Amino acid sequence: MGELKDRNIIIDDTTLRDGEQTAGVVFSLEEKIRIARMLDQIGVGELECGIPAMGAEEQAAVRALVDLGLKARLITWNRATISDIQASIDSGVKAVDISLSVSDIHIKNKLRKSRSWVKEQLKVALDFAKKHDLYVSVGGEDSSRADLDFMVELMTIAKDLGADRFRYCDTLGILEPFTTYENVRYLLERVPMEIEVHTHDDLGMATANAIAGIKAGANFVNTTVNGLGERAGNAALEEVVMALKHACGHDLGIDTRRFVEISKFVGQASSRPVPEWKSVVGERVFSHESGLHADGVIKNPSNYEGFDPAEVGLTRHLVLGKHSGSHALIHRLKRLGYELNRLEANDLMDRVRSISQRNKRALTDPELMTLCRSI
């Protein structure tokens, strides 16, 4: 499996497919083009860009993305049927994800078929795709609830028939990182085949599970901007990239400085505004109010910041409120053109805390200036 620094980890971003499957989200063609271009420009290696089997309009949208001539590989999502794969071929893509249900729960209650039927369906679909020289990822829907040895059988069939990788899907977001690591490692030890991890956030562990899958040996990982996706969403692009860089020491070479720009646009296009406290890209994740923290940041930002906010296109804020200290107040007012000594700052700090407590929020710059003028 090797160290992360020796491996080529590929982001397969599925904002345009699974992200758009978020309940109530629809991207216009112009929005899809802009999202695709931005992701391509920052260095994302692969974009899952739609479901051509949905009809002519979706096929035209995928074709428009193909015609952009992006550096990123475009891949579409398909059921394991010839008609779905043909729709993708007609859309102009050269790569497809072929999805099958692999858990006994799905096979019995959703497909109402058998394991043997699933294996035959895989053979038929994969044979058709490879005869058309397509790059193929075989997607194991509900992998996290599937029998691991049955998945070994499916992966062996897929590898023997020329599939390029297997997608391990935590479709319901029910795993934790330790089990994700163990399951991915189990599969890789038995079938020497590229693995992709697709994680959901129903228990708040999509990013952690994505990282665990990569650490176990998966070289492909699905993400979406802002963590959009079915139900609670997918692993967020910005979280996975920054976690790999700062928690794992592996820089993917992606231009993270545009993360906030992309996040805001996708938030607007999806009518899902980005919360101020959203990990990595939230407007206020580099805000400091506590006197101890603010003082530490003033002395050296690395005291209380894991990375420079400029890395993702943000700036830090020193918030003045109930928990603030005089160092932050002096620092903030100096930027506004007011020089205070320590005694003046201490007196003003009492009034700042009182107003903040009464209004249940931090003070604005105009409010601070009014207070200064009063003394």
Image (cartoon, rainbow, N blue to C red):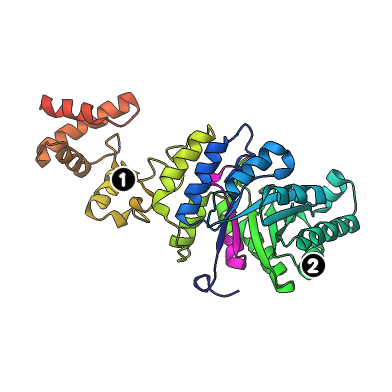
Residue 359 in the magenta stretch? The answer is no
Q: Is residue 169 left or right of residue 154?
A: left
For disc 1, the neighbor class at 10 Å (few under 14, some 14 to 19, many from 20) is some
Which residue is more in the foreground, 298 or 344? 298
The residue stretch that appears in magenta? 211-231
Q: Is residue 159 left or right of residue 225?
A: right
Say if residue 230 shows up in the picture: no
Query: Is 139 drawn above or below residue 341 in the view shown?
Result: below
> Residue 362, how many percent across, how many down?
30, 32
Residue 221: quadrant of the picture: bottom right
Q: Earlier in the sequence, mark 2 or mark 1?
A: 2
Q: Quadrant of the N terminus?
A: bottom right
Which residue is more in the foreground, 358 or 24? 24
Q: Quadrant of the C terminus?
A: top left
Query: Is 360 drawn above or below residue 343 in the view shown?
Result: above
Which residue appears at 60% of the width and 42% of the height? 19
Residue bearing the label numbered 1: 316
Which residue appears at 41% of the width and 45% of the height? 260
Residue bearing the label numbered 2: 161
Q: Is residue 92 left or right of residue 156?
A: left
Q: Secondary structure at mark 2?
A: loop
Q: Is residue 60 left or right of residue 313?
A: right
